[in-house]
Structure formats: structure tokens, C-alpha cells
């Protein structure tokens, strides 16, 4: 079985400060890991993914995420937050060894960036 | 750009009605998915399809069925709508291969009265 935990329902940061949105996962094999963002009244948009190789993954809009196998984490980061980054963020995992279709999503973290 | 469209943004139905939610993608993706999104529960997979006429149950298939007669179209059917099916429904698609990201439609907010 695979699972994802996003331990924080809400993250608040000031504009210009660094942000981190946390994600931990559990899979029986090796993971594929994804971050998606959802702006109000819209569907999810893909931000970045970890497949293999370099543990630091760079994605859209200046976001990056660090894969840490020993801590089973894949935290989303950005060096300098913008008010427009305010949105709902989802982490998702797939076990490389299982059916290609099934992803498991976390419950989501609401990021609020204040001016 | 990949485009995933859903037939309605908002839908209001009555208990016991049969409800059809349609999803169309234009990128020749093999995989298509239906999720429901509820506050605090994240996204939960209802059904997915990896080919025409092929389907697999997700985590919460009860009360739902699906149809995929053409590669680009994936329909979610609520045979007899109930109030506990009031939710946001999201369709997604992707290329085959578990390393591929999903592309989502804008969602349908369904209210069952």
C-alpha cells in the first residue's frame, strides 16, 4: 500500500521569505513523487516530479523539491515567496512497482503568502 | 498545451437522478481518471481507465460507474445520486507510465439535493 502525509493543513509566510510545504510518503518499493498546485476554482496543475537521479528537483514558477530517501520526504520549497503563490498544494506518490495508474494524494496544504 | 475539459462547471441534481459527468482530453493520453475532492480529504480516486473499454476501480467506486468508448472521452455515471455524493469531481489524463504526471480538468461541482 502507498500513502502520503502532508502534516500541515496551513502554511503562512510573508512575501519575500522562503517557504516550505512538507510531504512524507510510504511505499513498498521505490517512489515516483509529484507536486501539484490548485488555484481557487480551478483544477490541479503539475509543478514538478521526482523520478530518479538528482535529489533536488526544479519545477515551474521557481519551485523546487528535495527527495530524501532516508526520511521518506519530498518537501516543496521556494527561496522567495510571492503573494500569487497562495494556493492549495498537493503531494502525490506512485510506487514504481505497481499499477501505472494509481496515484495517492495527500490531503493538501493551503499556502497563504501575505504582503 | 494539453487540454482536459469537463462538460459542466456546476451541476445541481435531485436525489435518485442518474447523473452523467463527461470528460474529454485532446492529447491522445492512454490513461484517464476520475477523482472526487472533499475538504480535508484530498483527492480520492473513483475509477481509472488505461485503454478504451478498460477500467479499474479506485479507492471509492461504490455508487459510481464509468464508460470509455473512445480514447479521448471518459464518463462518470452516478446511477442514483445521493446527497453524500455532493462534491467536486475532477477528471485527469496522462500518458501510460507511472512516471508521467497527470493533467487535470477544471472540475465539476456537483450538488445533490
Image: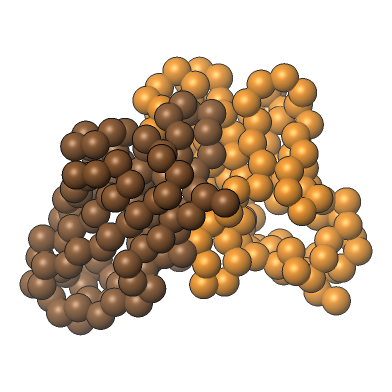
Chain colours: A orange, B brown
Residue A33, visible in the rendered structure: yes
Question: x, y percentage for residue A113?
Answer: 78, 69
Along the line of sight, the residue nearer the viewer: A95 or B78: B78
| Residue at 28% over, 60% down | B22
Q: Is residue B55 above or below residue B90?
A: above
Along the line of sight, the residue nearer the viewer: A10 or A39: A39
Along the line of sight, the residue nearer the viewer: B6 or B72: B72
Question: x, y percentage for residue B26?
Answer: 42, 49
Q: Residue furthest right?
A: A16
| Residue at 65% over, 31% down | A50
| Residue at 33% over, 71% down | B8
Tell whether A113 sits left or right of A5.
right
Q: How many marks?
A: 0
Q: Is residue A53 above or below residue A72?
A: above
Position of the C terminus of chain B by quadrant: bottom left
Residue A6, visible in the rendered structure: no
Amino acid at each position: 500500500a502507498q500513502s502520503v502525509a502532508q502534516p500541515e493543513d496551513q502554511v503562512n509566510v510573508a512575501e519575500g521569505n522562503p517557504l516550505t510545504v512538507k510531504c512524507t510518503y510510504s511505499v513498498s518499493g521505490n517512489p515516483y513523487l509529484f507536486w501539484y498546485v490548485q488555484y481557487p476554482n480551478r483544477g490541479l496543475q503539475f509543478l514538478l516530479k521526482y523520478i530518479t537521479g538528482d535529489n533536488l528537483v526544479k519545477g515551474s514558477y521557481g519551485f523546487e523539491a528535495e527527495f530524501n530517501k532516508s526520511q521518506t520526504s519530498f518537501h516543496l520549497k521556494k527561496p522567495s515567496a510571492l503573494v500569487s503563490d497562495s494556493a492549495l498544494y498537493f503531494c502525490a506518490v506512485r510506487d514504481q512497482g505497481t499499477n501505472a495508474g494509481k496515484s495517492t494524494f495527500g490531503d493538501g496544504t493551503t499556502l497563504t503568502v501575505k504582503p | 498545451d494539453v487540454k482536459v475539459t469537463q462538460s459542466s462547471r456546476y451541476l445541481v441534481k435531485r436525489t435518485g437522478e442518474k447523473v452523467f459527468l463527461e470528460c474529454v482530453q485532446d492529447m491522445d493520453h492512454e490513461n484517464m481518471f476520475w477523482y472526487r475532492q472533499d475538504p480535508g480529504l484530498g483527492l480520492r480516486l473513483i475509477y481509472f481507465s488505461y485503454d478504451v473499454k478498460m477500467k479499474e476501480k479506485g479507492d471509492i467506486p461504490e455508487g459510481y460507474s464509468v464508460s470509455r468508448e473512445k480514447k479521448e472521452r471518459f464518463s462518470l455515471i452516478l446511477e442514483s445520486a445521493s446527497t453524500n455524493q455532493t462534491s467536486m469531481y475532477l477528471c485527469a489524463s496522462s500518458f501510460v507510465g507511472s512516471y508521467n504526471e497527470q493533467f487535470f480538468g477544471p472540475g465539476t461541482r456537483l450538488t445533490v439535493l
